[in-house]
Image (cartoon, rainbow, N blue to C red):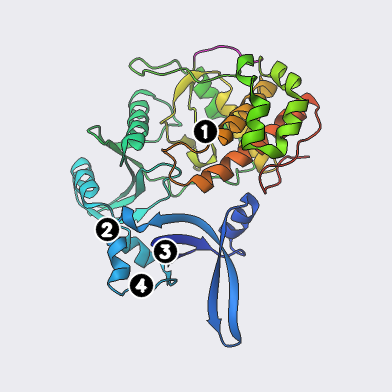
Amino acid sequence: MSYHFTDGSFWMVTSPDSLHGRLMARRGRGTMTVQFEAGDGRRVYQWYVIATARAPRCPRLAAWPARGNLDEGSFVPWSLYARIVDLDPRIRRRAEAMLGGPILRWRPRDAGLTHAVTGIATLAAGGTMFLKAATDEYSAREVGADLQALLTIAAGFMPELLGQDASHPPMLALEDLSRGHWPEPYPDDLFRLEAALAQLRSLPVPDGLTLEPLDRPRPEGWTDIAAAARSGAPAVAAWVAKHEAALLAAATGVRSTRCLVHGDLWYSNICFLEDRVVLVDWSHVRVGSPWHDAATVSIDLIIEGRPPLPMEEAAAWASYWLAQSVYVLAGGPPPSISEPSRWRTDVEELLDGAAWWVADELGLPYPPPVSDRHVGWR
């Protein structure tokens, strides 16, 4: 991997023949075209864009090109990028006070679709840890909810909390999980993940953890599903309209329960260590159906071309996520999303996975795809 500077941004890119490049090709991620001078003229290469960092979010990054140290279109090695994209001084001061010592090195990490600052901090006293700091109202609510869950839920799948600062905007420090395996792809053996989900389903809601109920499939939620599909996902609008009665009937199959639910258990929030599975980012923890989290993992598996996890209420949850993705696409990205194009790609893949799943469960013909990625396991 390397970093390409262009138009005020650093683009983390990888070549198509690399491990990350093959993964990005499967996921249908965006690409950038890069031209190199070669002895036989210009050669054009296609690089896969993994993540970006905008100059305005980092003063040192913004100042670097102006000093003439970096030309437009130049590639930057990781070591230089890590020195340029440093912690905001205000976040650094608070983090060092929280951790009880100076941070010797900072390695930024992709924060997903929020505006939180995340990365691996190496302390002068030794050791590394994962730091997550809110930067606006949206990320403050998320980091605050994550911290509340970390302080109240006791289980082997929880990450170790190493530091906290609940003042506004909040920040927290967790054990460094860089050594683990982060999907995708998921490992072949999902036994430990299934065991962690079973343990989560069995946990009582902790005292002191105030949780809202998660949405669940309801017949009244489908009144305008065909219209929403025409607006947000026209490729499947005719298929949804044709099978709306069957989808509506399936959506009534979820029990109303008050189980503890992670609420955002997609592949990026699951870490596989040698001895355990760790579930991270508890900012969407809620109460709801015991099969909610198994359903999100199942859709990720279907997108990878694998069958879903064994679970109850499968048809209902497949219908639910189909409806959710259609309505979300029709409404567009919320203001809290930092990368709208990446958000849309993820939601389109979610729609395809859910549509394939519900068609398989109900014996319906498979719908046309919305995303550029092939999903399904048959």
Q: Secondary structure at mark 1?
A: loop
**Residue at 66%, 32% in the rendered image:** 229
Mark 3 vs mark 4: give the one in front.
3
User: Nearer the N terminus, badge 2 or badge 4?
Assistant: 2
Could you tell me how far apart the alpha carbons at marks 1 and 3 are, in whole angstroms?
Answer: 34 Å
* 111 lies above or below 362: below
The picture places residue 192, in percent across and down from the top left corner, at: 56, 33
Query: Could you tell me residue 188's position as x and y percent?
Result: 64, 42
Residue 7 — which label?
3
Mark 2 or mark 1, whichever is nearer to me: 2
Figure quadrant of the C terminus: top right
Three-letter residue code for mark 3: Asp
| 1 and 3 marks in contact (CB < 8 Å) | no
Disc marking residue 265: 1
The boundaries of the magenta stretch are 253-258
Q: Is residue 199 left or right of residue 241?
A: left
Which label was assigned to residue 59?
2
- Label 2–label 4 contact, CB within 8 A: no
From where the camera sits, is residue 182 visible? no
Q: Nearer the viewer, mark 1 or mark 4?
A: 4
Q: CA distance from mark 2 to mark 4?
A: 15 Å
Quadrant of the rendered image containing residue 238: top right
Mark in front: 3 vs 2: 3
For the residues bearing labels 1 and 4, Cβ distance under 8 angstroms: no
Residue highlighted by disc 4: 70
Type of amino acid at the residue the image marks with label 2? Pro
Q: Amino acid at mark 4?
A: Leu
- Spatial CA distance of label 2 from label 1 is 34 Å
